[in-house]
Amino acid sequence: MRFPNRSDAKSSYTFKRYMSEKSLDRDLKKGSAELMVLSLLEHEQRHGYEISKLIEARSRGRVRFRVASLYPMLYRLEDRGWIQGRWIEKAGQRRRRYYRLTPGGRKMLAERRAGWEAFVEAIRRITGTEYA
């Protein structure tokens, strides 16, 4: 791609850099989404909205899931046998689908955590000051 002047080249670079940062954020979120959900279901059953709000609160607003992406992921996890959902009705409240971790989900959570910890350690070794 040819640029008539230097400022056009710079604005294109900035745009591409911004797009790649957004893409990186999206890829990191995708890769860690299942880990986050499985982790939140480790000790108690939760419904989708609660999972979404916990992720947002614990990440201090840095990670948010839209309903359009969270629920399809919950259905995929259920199809894989990692979580199990059931409808619960409580007096004065609307019916909600609560999810819990299955034994297969616990195994997958352990594997995902180990992989995530290895990844974070590798990044720390690359970016940490002790190795600079």
Image (cartoon, rainbow, N blue to C red):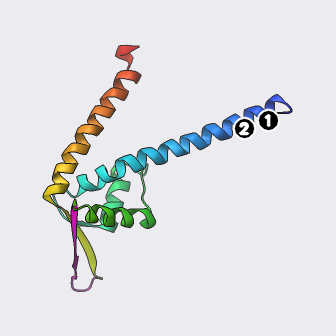
- Name which residue type carries label 1: Asp
Disc 1 from disc 2: Cα separation: 6 Å
Front-most of residues 19 and 49? 19
Is there CB contact under 8 Å for labels 1 and 2?
yes
**What residue is shown at x 67% (from left), y 36% (from top)?**
14
**What residue is shown at x 29% (from left), y 56% (from top)?**
37
**Residue extending furthest right?**
4
Q: Position of residue 101 (x, y in %)?
A: 18, 60
Extent of the magenta region: 83-93
| 9 relative position to 86: left or right | right
Q: Position of residue 5 (x, y in %)?
A: 85, 30
Query: Residue 123 sits in which quadrant?
Result: top left
Above or below 51: residue 16: above
The residue singled out by tag 2 in the image is 12
**What residue is shown at x 33% (from left), y 33% (from top)?**
120
Above or below 74: residue 128: above
Q: Position of residue 95 (x, y in %)?
A: 28, 81
- Name which residue type carries label 2: Ser
| 54 relative position to 24: left or right | left
Quadrant containing the C terminus in the rendered view = top left
On residue 85, the disc is none
